[in-house]
Image (spheres, helix red, strand yellow):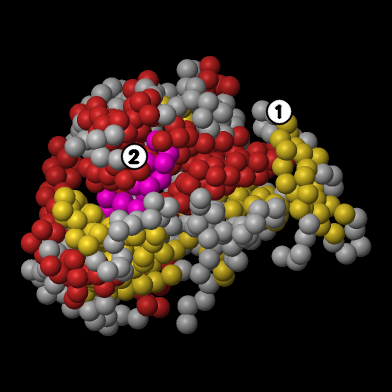
Amino acid sequence: MLKKKFIVPVVLSSALLVGSIPASIVFANPIDSKVANSVQASKKWNEKASVPIFVKERMAEKFSSSNPSNALNYLKKNEGKTGIENPDKKLKLKDTQIDKLGMTHVRFNQSINGVDVEGSEIIVHFNKNNEVVSVNGRINQTIADDAVDTTASLSSDAALKAALSSVNAPEELTYEPTSELVVYPFEGDNYTAYKVNVNFMGDEPGNWFVFVDANTGEIIDKYNGLMHADEMKTQKGAGKGVHGAHRDIHITQVKEPKSGTQFALADYSHNGLDGILTYDAKNDNSSSNDTLYVGNSAAFIGDYDRALVDAHYNSEKVYDYYLNEHGRNSLDGEGMAIISKVHYGNNYNNASWNGRWMTYGDGDGEFFISLSAGLDVAAHEMTHGVITHTANLVYRNQSGALNESFADVFGALVDDDDWEMGEEIMAPAAKADGVTRLRSLSNPNSVVVSNVDRRAYSTNGGVYPAHMDEFYYMPTSVDGGGVHVNSSITNHAAYLIGQEIGRHKLGQIYYRAISVYLTPNSDFSDARKAIVQSAIDIYGEGSEEEAAAAAGFDSVGIY
C-alpha cells in the first residue's frame, strides 16, 4: 500500500510567471526548424483527434423541454450536420446548466464503454423556448476508425506510484492524489490511461497531470498545471498594504486557551461563502506549518502584515466582482473558501493557483516586490480558479494561452485603472531599467519577454506578440508551448473589443464564453467563435457588440 504524508489543504495557483528572470536582455535566436516542424506534424494529426464543432441553427428545432434526452435526440437527427456519429452511444452526460438569459446548456463527454475521452466535450444550447440554437465543442473522430480497448490491467495504485516517481514528488503532498481512467489521444494513438493529479509545494511547486498507460505502466504524457471552524464572529478591521494604502478588511476574533483575544485574517461575513482566509506561509517551501494569520490587534499595520493584508483585501475585491457582475459565488460558483498563502518561499518571484488555493511570494526585491500587492495579480490567480470550475482549459499550447489570457483580461477588468498587468508588483530596480509592468493588453509589443528561453522562439525582436503573425511556436517543454507569451495576442483582442463597448460589456461577454461555450481543448479560433456567439446571446444578432467582438479578433489575425 502506498504511504504518503498528506497535508490537509486549508489554503489556494496556474502560475502568473514561470521560469527564471535574467538580469540582462539577450537577442532572440532563430526558431529551430526541427521544433517548428514537429509542432506542425503534431497539429496535423490533432486536427482529426480534436475536431472543433460549432453549428448554429437558423431554423431552430423546438422540443417539449430543454433536457439531456432531447439534446441527444437533436444530435441523433443531425449527425450529418454535426459530424457526431451514434451520439447516444458515444456521449455521456456531464452536466446541465441554466443561465440568467434562460438558456439551457447540456454538456456531454465523448466516451467509449463509459470511459471519457480526455478533452472531448460537446455542448447543446437551448434557448428559453426549448429550441436548439447551437452546438459546439470538440470531438475525437479517430475513435470511429480505431478500436480502443478500455480495459485496464494496471491497478490505480500502481499508476499512482509511477506518476509520483515521474514528477519527483516529495513525501509531503498538499492533498491526496486523484486518479481516473480515460482514453487519452496522444501522438497518433488513443491510449487507455490513468489521469493522475499530483499536487505539492516545495522548491519547485507542482500541480501535475500525469497520463499513465493503463496496461504497461509507462508514462504517456505529463504537464504541470500549476497556474503557479468554530462559530466565530467576523468584524471590521483595518490594515496597511504593501504600498502603504489604508485597507478596510473583515477579520474574526479568536481566543485561545490561557491567552487573550486575538484577531485572524478570516472573513465569514458573506452569506453562502465558506470564508476568505489568509495564511502565513512563513517563508518556507512547505505547507505543513502554514497557519491562519493572527494578530494581537484589529489593526494589521506591521511591515510583515502588509503583504498579508493586501492578499486578504484583494481576495474580497475579486470575490465581490464575480458576485456582483456575474452572480458567481466564489471560484467554484458554490461558495468554496477563498484561501491565500502569503510569504511563500524565500525571495520567491511568483504567484500561483494550484487548483485549490492561491500562493504569493515576496519577490526578490530586484524584479518583484510582494506579489500580493497587485489587485490584478489576485484577480488573475483567482480567475484561474474560476476557469478550473468552468471551461477547465488545458494548461498548455493554445488552450493554456487562453487560460492565461482570460486570467489577464479579468485581472484588468477587476483592477480597472489601466490595461496593464503587474504594474503594482514591479521592484524599483526593475522600474529603473524600464520594466514597469509584466504584460500590456493595450500594447503587447511595448514589453520585452523577460525569459531568454522563451525569447529564443520569437520572430519579432523578443517582445510580446500582438498578432498571429508574431506567434511564438514553442515546444511544450518551454512555457507549456507559450502559454504566458502567446496569451498576449488574445489579450490584445480583448483590449480592442473593450475600447469599443466598454469594460462592463466585455466582462459579460467573456464570462459567458468561459462558463457556457469553451471546452478543455479550445483553441484561439474556438475562442473567437465563443466570444462572438456570447455577444449575440446577450446583445443580439447584428448588434454593435457582436461587430466589435468580431473586429477585435480580425485585428489580431484570429478567424
Q: Is residue 508 magenta?
A: yes
Task: Kindly check if marks 1 and 2 are in contact, taking CB atoms under 8 A apart as contact.
Answer: no
Comparing 130 with 558, the one in front is: 130
**Which mark, residue 148?**
none
Q: Which residues are magenta?
A: 506-524
Crowding at mark 1 (Cα within 10 Å: few <14, some 14-19, many 20+): few
- Residue 16, given in percent of the width and then of the height, sits at 46, 41
Q: Amino acid at mark 2?
A: Tyr
SS at badge 1: loop
Q: Residue at x 13, y 72 (%)?
A: 86
**Which mark, residue 539?**
2
SS at badge 2: helix
The total number of labels drawn is 2
Comparing 474 with 396, the one in front is: 396
Q: Which residue is mark 1?
A: 244
Q: Residue at x 56, y 69 (%)?
A: 6
> Where 281 sits versus 86, above or below?
above
* Dot placed on the residue nearer the N-terminal end, 1 or 2: 1
Q: Main secondary structure of the magenta part?
A: helix
In the image: residue 524, left or right of residue 102: left
In the image: residue 330, left or right of residue 59: right
Q: Residue at x 77, y 45 (%)?
A: 236
Q: Which image quadrant is residue 36 in?
A: top left
> Where 277 sits versus 308, above or below?
below
Q: Is residue 75 magenta?
A: no
Q: Amino acid at mark 1?
A: Gly
- Residue 194, given in percent of the width and then of the height, sits at 32, 71
Q: Residue at x 66, y 50 (%)?
A: 278
In the image: residue 142, left or right of residue 488: left
Identify the image quadrant of the C terminus. top left
